[in-house]
């Protein structure tokens, strides 16, 4: 971080404090903010205390789900974050003598999604040389609450939200994945599965499934509703879909996931998949949510096109 002070209406305010505040707000954690910035936890605490003294405001409040910014802190973040990003981008293009360096980019992309999309997307990006330098991708699976997720998108604390639809919001653009078709995934030498899976057989098999951290009533649980309607019990539920896939790869259990993701696990493990013809695929549509101001963002659109299986542009 550059050592920057502003001596106008807020004399002596170190702009590094605002960079630290932004990291705390974006991670909802002083510990994670310290990791992101390469600072000690005591440095984060010191910065927050300096801001509290300067503005005579608590700045952040500890809750059971992490630290939450006060209204003043959120206003500070919304008004200064774009300016800090622009300033840091400019400083990163200059050498110590103030001469322009060769073109370079440094950007953090924050994505909220479940573990299975996290794994699939990160696997694609690791192979893409365009994302080898200049980008950091931060994946999180929390929260699953509609209002909390929309608030994070509105405040640009999350750049991209991938999951079940959060409904309509004037500040959010929603793009539905057109290739969302569910399949059964299981190991190749499964002793009882041939060329198709009937509901009667599905009811007899062990099934590893997904459940959100917010429990059975979460908006992200239409699959749970489907199994309840069909009177099919799943004994093993986890908030990590990766767990479900790994168990299916090493047992006689069955897991369910989107078809476009299945080939990756078939390549990595000795697995195969079959269509879930009894599912209403429209009911389980997956959407990509971004802030309306980011509708032309080349990186976010590239990721969305990747998810949709469309031709990708240049970020």
Image (cartoon, rainbow, N blue to C red):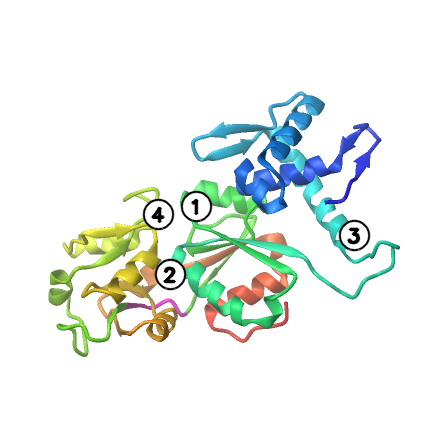
On residue 91, the disc is 3
Q: Earlier in the sequence, mark 4 or mark 1?
A: 1
Q: Which residue is mark 1?
A: 142
Q: Position of residue 185 (x, y in %)?
A: 27, 68
Q: Report the Cα–Cα distance between label 4 and label 1.
A: 13 Å
- Is there CB contact under 8 Å for labels 3 and 2? no
Q: Earlier in the sequence, mark 3 or mark 1?
A: 3
Q: Report the Cα–Cα distance between label 3 and label 1.
A: 33 Å
**Quarter of the figure with residue 39:** top right
Asked whether 193 or 4 is in front, the reply is 4
Instruction: Residue at 60% x, 72% y: name it.
Output: 313
Q: Report the Cα–Cα distance between label 3 and label 2.
A: 43 Å
Q: Earlier in the sequence, mark 3 or mark 4?
A: 3
Q: Earlier in the sequence, mark 2 or mark 1?
A: 1
Quadrant in which the N terminus is drawn: top right
In the image, which residues are magenta? 179-183
Disc 2 on helix, strand or loop? loop
For label 4, the crowd category at 10 Å Cα-Cα, with few meaning under 14, some 14 to 19 and many 20 or more, is some
Q: Position of residue 6 (x, y in %)?
A: 81, 34
Q: Which residue is mark 4?
A: 219
- Is there CB contact under 8 Å for labels 3 and 4? no
Disc 4 on helix, strand or loop? loop
Q: Position of residue 30 (x, y in %)?
A: 55, 36
Which is more foreground, mark 3 or mark 1?
A: 3
The main secondary structure of the magenta stretch is loop
For label 1, the crowd category at 10 Å Cα-Cα, with few meaning under 14, some 14 to 19 and many 20 or more, is some
For label 2, the crowd category at 10 Å Cα-Cα, with few meaning under 14, some 14 to 19 and many 20 or more, is some
237 w.r.t. 263: above or below = above
Which is more foreground, mark 3 or mark 4?
A: 3
Position of residue 196 in the picture relative to residue 148 (left or right): left
Q: Position of residue 314 (x, y in %)?
A: 63, 71
């Amino acid at each position: 971080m550059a050592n920057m002070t502003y001596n106008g209406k807020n004399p002596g305010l170190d702009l590094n404090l605002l960079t630290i505040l932004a990291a705390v707000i974006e991670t909802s954690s002083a510990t994670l903010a310290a990791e992101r910035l390469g600072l000690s936890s005591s440095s984060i605490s010191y910065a927050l205390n300096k801001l509290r003294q300067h503005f005579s405001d608590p700045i952040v409040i500890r809750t059971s789900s992490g630290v939450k910014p006060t209204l003043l802190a959120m206003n500070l973040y919304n008004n200064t974050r774009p300016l800090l990003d622009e300033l840091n981008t400019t400083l990163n293009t200059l050498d110590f003598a103030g001469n322009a360096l060769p073109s370079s980019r440094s950007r953090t992309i924050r994505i909220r999604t479940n573990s299975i999309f996290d794994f699939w997307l990160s696997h694609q990006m690791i192979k893409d040389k365009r994302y080898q330098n200049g980008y950091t991708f931060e994946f999180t699976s929390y929260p699953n609450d509609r209002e909390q997720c929309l608030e994070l998108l509105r405040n640009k604390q999350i750049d991209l939200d991938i999951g079940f639809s959060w409904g309509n919001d004037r500040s959010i653009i929603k793009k539905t994945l057109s290739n969302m078709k569910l399949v059964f995934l299981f190991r190749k030498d499964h002793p009882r599965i041939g060329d198709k899976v009937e509901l009667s057989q599905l009811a007899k098999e062990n099934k590893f499934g997904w459940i959100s951290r917010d429990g059975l009533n979460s908006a992200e649980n239409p699959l749970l509703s489907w199994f309840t309607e069909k009177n099919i019990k799943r004994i093993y539920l986890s908030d990590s879909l990766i767990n479900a896939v790994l168990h299916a790869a090493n047992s006689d259990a069955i897991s369910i996931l989107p078809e476009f993701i299945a080939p990756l696990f078939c390549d990595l493990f000795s697995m195969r998949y079959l269509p879930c013809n009894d599912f209403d695929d429209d009911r389980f549509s997956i959407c990509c949510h971004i802030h309306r101001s980011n509708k032309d963002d080349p990186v976010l659109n590239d990721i969305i096109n990747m998810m949709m299986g469309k031709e990708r542009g240049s970020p």
